[in-house]
Image: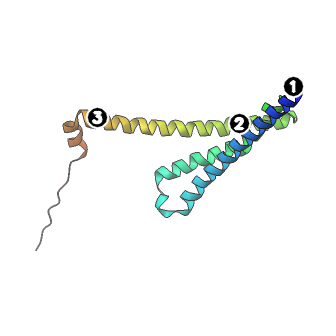
Amino acid sequence: MNRINNKKNLNYKYLFFCLVIFFTIGGNSLVCIAVIRERNLQNTNNYFLTSLAFTDCLVACLVMPLAVTVELIGHFPFDALACNVWLTFDVCCCTSSIWHMRSWSFLFCCLEINSFLYLVQCHVFGSLFNTSISVKIRTK
């Protein structure tokens, strides 16, 4: 009886991990497709977001399936070369994804500091960035 429960738990774990991989690939692919197809979405911020979605797709395609296999069976089922290749993909793809998120958080931090400075010292901060240049047009 205990062995049957372990198999059921293993099947539920496998199903859960497969759904996570499927939704990760699907959701990030939709982000990439939306930015590529819609002209209104093609700006610098969305290109950066698309790059993050692409790196997350690489993690889901190259790293997560073997990670699930190792998690479920308890050891790496292939030879040492495949293990080294998988670890290389793991380090490169996950590091790229993490650095993308770190860059986003740095950007939002700068925007928050900007908003804070504007609220606290709006008379000084506003005069620095809201100056207007008037142009005199000469007519003959």
Q: Which residue is mark 3?
A: 117
Amino acid, disc 1: Asn
The residue shown at (52%, 62%) is: 38
Q: Which residue is mark 1?
A: 2
Q: Is residue 33 above or below residue 59?
A: below
Q: Which residue is mark 2?
A: 90
Query: Is 111 on the left or on the right of 4, as rendered?
Result: left
Q: Are marks 3 and 2 in contact (CB under 8 Å)?
A: no
Q: Is residue 42 above or below residue 64?
A: below
Question: In 3D space, how far apart are the residues under numbered discs 1 and 2 (Cα atoms)?
Answer: 35 Å
Question: In 3D space, how far apart are the residues under numbered discs 3 and 1 (Cα atoms)?
Answer: 62 Å
In the rendered image, residue 101, in percent from the top left (x then y), is placed at 54, 38
> How many labels, in total?
3
Task: Spot the residue most to the bottom.
Answer: 140
The residue shown at (25%, 44%) is: 129
In the rendered image, residue 66, in percent from the top left (x then y), is placed at 78, 38
Q: Earlier in the sequence, mark 3 or mark 1?
A: 1
Q: Element under label 2?
A: helix
Task: Spot the residue most to the top.
Answer: 2
Q: Quadrant of the C terminus?
A: bottom left
Query: Is 21 on the left or on the right of 73, as rendered?
Result: left
